[in-house]
Image: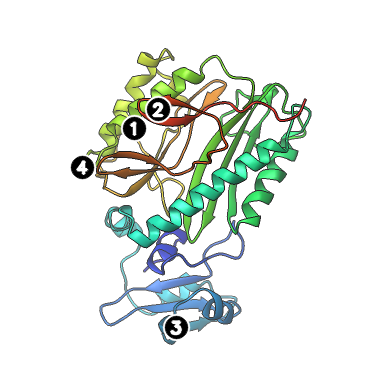
Amino acid sequence: MLTSHEAVSWYLDGVRTHVSLAGPPVLAVRVDDRGDTLYVAVNEAERLIAEELLPDDADSIVRVPWQIPPAVAAGEAGPAASESELAGALRAARAALLPAETDRYRALCRETAEAMTDAAASLGPHSTERDAAAALAAGLVARGIDPLVVLVAGAQRLGFRHPLPTDAPLGERAMLVVCGRRHGLIANATRWVGAAGDDDEKILALEAAFFAATRPGARLDDVFAAGCAAYGAAGFDVDQWQRHHQGGPTGYAGRDPRATGDNGDLVHENQAFAWNPSAPGVKVEDTVLVTSTGIEVLTVDSRWPVVEVAGLSRPDARAWSEG
């Protein structure tokens, strides 16, 4: 029984599973040897058939009264394994992206990065955090990308790791963070605008340790440990990793799963990752693909200034475009 956004969208090749970004999926899938059955809210069925699903899927739809959650209706059809019972197997099944998924992801990540560049170019130190959030969200939506997360911190609020936008001015240095979804896949990126930070080089050196350990066949807990151990070597407090999550695999979920020291999932070739090490006033994050030859950064826009770190182009702080 597939009932989550990430599982349903992955299984049905990137369909939009939501109406409200905060709500549950409007369909559930019962996967059986005899064929799949799609349980779809009756008020969403025709739109999904016309715009989202494959022609053959229409023959597998059971229309569910609007007042009954599709997952409940699917469960009433008989015993079935839940996602929680098969969580590890499902993560492994969707970890290595297929060629069509990789093409979609590259396009999504590139356009997400372009939206961030466009937004940054429209802002200045007197812009507010909400101005920045509006520009980021508008750029994503214009590209058909759902803005799942939009965070902005101006100079006064750089101590917060998840800064929801306020009316505060951006000031001399600001952080922009987005997570955008299209075709079920999620692009994650963080950018800095304004003045360079004292610890910018250190956080990029720390990120390089995560990248160096993220290789096909490695265990996720070992990669996590290698990155966390690098905090001290990079010049940060050795316990800084405990103050914010470090990211992990991504794709059809923002983190699939969020890396900890307790998860031994294997790293797969063609799997996407988004590590995001951070310390007070500094953070780095991009969506990358693990390949047989190393790390491919996906959230890239050639207009954004970069520095070279361990053979990869990494984002630098972008100077304000206006005074």
Which numbered disc flags the more N-terminal residue, 4 or 1?
A: 1
Q: Find out whether the residues at labels 2 and 1 contact each other: C-beta distance under 8 Å.
A: yes
Residue tagged 4: 217
Where residue 55 is drawn, which disc sits there?
Answer: 3
Dot 1 amino acid type:
Phe
Where residue 207 is drawn, which disc sits there?
Answer: 2
Q: Is residue 178 above or below residue 261?
A: below
Note whether residue 236 is visible. Answer: yes
- Between the C-alphas of marks 4 and 1, the distance is 14 Å
Dot 2 amino acid type:
Glu
292 left or right of 310 in image: left
Q: Is residue 168 above or below residue 280?
A: below
Q: Find out whether the residues at labels 4 and 1 contact each other: C-beta distance under 8 Å.
A: no
Dot 3 amino acid type:
Pro
Q: Find out whether the residues at labels 4 and 3 contact each other: C-beta distance under 8 Å.
A: no
- Between the C-alphas of marks 4 and 2, the distance is 20 Å
- Between the C-alphas of marks 3 and 1, the distance is 41 Å
Q: Quadrant of the C terminus?
A: top right
- For mark 4, give the secondary structure: loop
Q: Position of residue 3 (x, y in %)?
A: 43, 65
Q: Find out whether the residues at labels 4 and 2 contact each other: C-beta distance under 8 Å.
A: no
Where residue 211 is drawn, which disc sits there?
Answer: 1
